[in-house]
Amino acid sequence: MDAVRAVLIDIDGVLTVSWQPLPGAVEALREIRASGLAVALVTNTTSRTRASVADTLSGAGFPVSAEDILTAPSVTARYLADHCPGARCSLLNSGDIRADLVGVSVVDDEADQVSAPDVVLLGGAGPEFDYTALNRAFGHLQRGARLVAMHRNLYWRTDQGLQLDSGAFLLGLEQAAGVVAEVTGKPSPAFFEAALARLGVGAGQALMVGDDIENDVLAAQRAGITGVLVRTGKYRPETYRAASGEPDHVLDCFTDLPSLLR
């Protein structure tokens, strides 16, 4: 812990559930901030912009601003600019995130006289992921469009329990179209590299806290970051037992993190 200079923190399931703070999470983050550690909130959330996430969290008492938040859409925008500049993208996502997709050309592929897009871009699942939309995406992929996914989470935790996420549909599109998605959010190494670059620290100086053992914790550890799994959010004992590796640390909840850091 003496080497730690920065903390990467997942939001949903670690600090909040359905955007409501988990008990003690606000106070724990304030203590971490007061210790002088750099903080980045890293999330695969695709239903809100960075500004919206910051407004919600700060309104609940968390000491954060939009500059502290790194989302899958913001990393995706950078990825598309680097790997397929100028590409015309068909976006399938639940929520308006275009403000974070800076420089991305999103086409309305439901309109008539629109040529086929270059990229099928998948965000988070919701009512928009119906048969018509998924079949349209399947058609684009058959015609040669690239498949770029902001994440491949199978589910997330809400106050109504676990809910399906876009990873479940992504698997179907990959199998049906015979393609492999390019993933930009967690667990992509590029996502963690972007977070470290923003904080100005090396992997050995950072710690990642998450409730998803594969996409948050073990992915961070593969990038050289110390991983901390919390038993909240989407954590389930059976998922932990079946995981592809062992976390560096396991805590009951985020409120235990300041003691670990000390």
Image: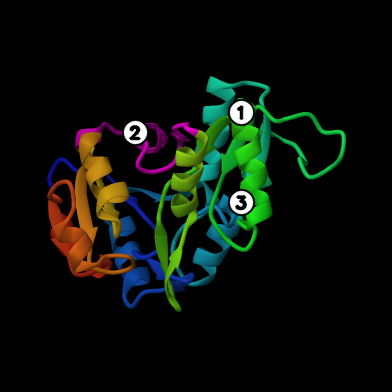
Amino acid marked by disc 3: Asn
Figure check: 214 above or below 237: above
- State whether residue 71 appears in this view: no
Give the percent coordinates (x, y) of residue 120.
61, 36
Residue on which the image places disc 2: 189
Amino acid marked by disc 1: Ala
- Which mark lies nearer to you, 2 or 1? 1
Residue on which the image places disc 3: 93
Q: Quadrant of residue 229?
A: bottom left
Label 3's element? loop
Taking 106 as reference, is 37 left or right?
Answer: left
Taking 129 as reference, is 262 left or right?
Answer: left
Give the percent coordinates (x, y) of residue 14.
34, 64
Query: Which region of the structure is painted magenta?
Result: 178-204
Q: Nearer the viewer, residue 140 or 205?
A: 140
Q: State yes or no: residue 184 in magenta.
A: yes
Give the percent coordinates (x, y) of residue 135.
64, 46
Residue on which the image places disc 1: 145
